[in-house]
Image (cartoon, helix red, strand yellow):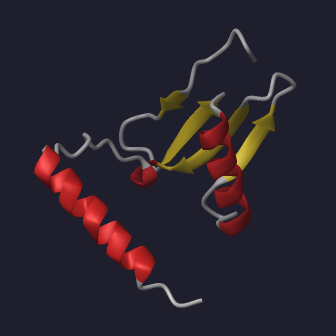
Amino acid sequence: MENDKENVIEWVRDEKRATLTLTQGRYRSKIKKLAKTHPEECQIVEDNKDGSIVAHIPVNWIKISPLKKVNEQQKEQARERMKMMQNNRHY
């Protein structure tokens, strides 16, 4: 799998199911978890010898979203909020 780094999402227009071929570890792990928790909607079709997987998921699970643009002031405010939340944790 070292040479094959391709992740593929494919579906036919107006179909409800998409087919994924995944080589990237974090996505393979996510799909494997979803297949366990949502077996009616997410099925692993093939667990390949090279480590890649082929799976079916609902098309409406696919989302394309750009990263949110934040300026330095917003980043600093977020850091401060995170610090406050961590300091207020009760164990």
Q: Which residue lies furthest to the right in this view?
A: 49
Residue 44 % position (x, y): 73, 46
**Quarter of the figure that contains the C terminus:** bottom right
Image coordinates of residue 48 in percent, x first then y, are 82, 28
Q: What residue is drawn where x is 46% and y is 50%? A: 16
Q: Position of residue 19 (x, y in %)?
A: 57, 37
Query: Residue 47 at what x, y percent from top left?
Result: 81, 36
Q: Which of 25 and 56 is in front in this view?
A: 25
Is 44 situated left or right of 42 in this image?
right
Please tell me in which quadrant of the rendered image residue 79 appears. Answer: bottom left
Tell me the quarter of the picture where residue 35 sits.
bottom right
Using residue 29 as the reference point, say whether residue 48 is left or right of it: right
**Quarter of the image where one finds residue 72:** top left
Residue 40 to residue 43: above or below: below
- Residue positioned 69% across, 58% down in the render: 33
Q: Nearer the viewer, residue 37 or 26?
A: 26
Q: Is 33 left or right of 14, judged from the image as shown?
A: right
Q: Is residue 23 above or below residue 84?
A: above
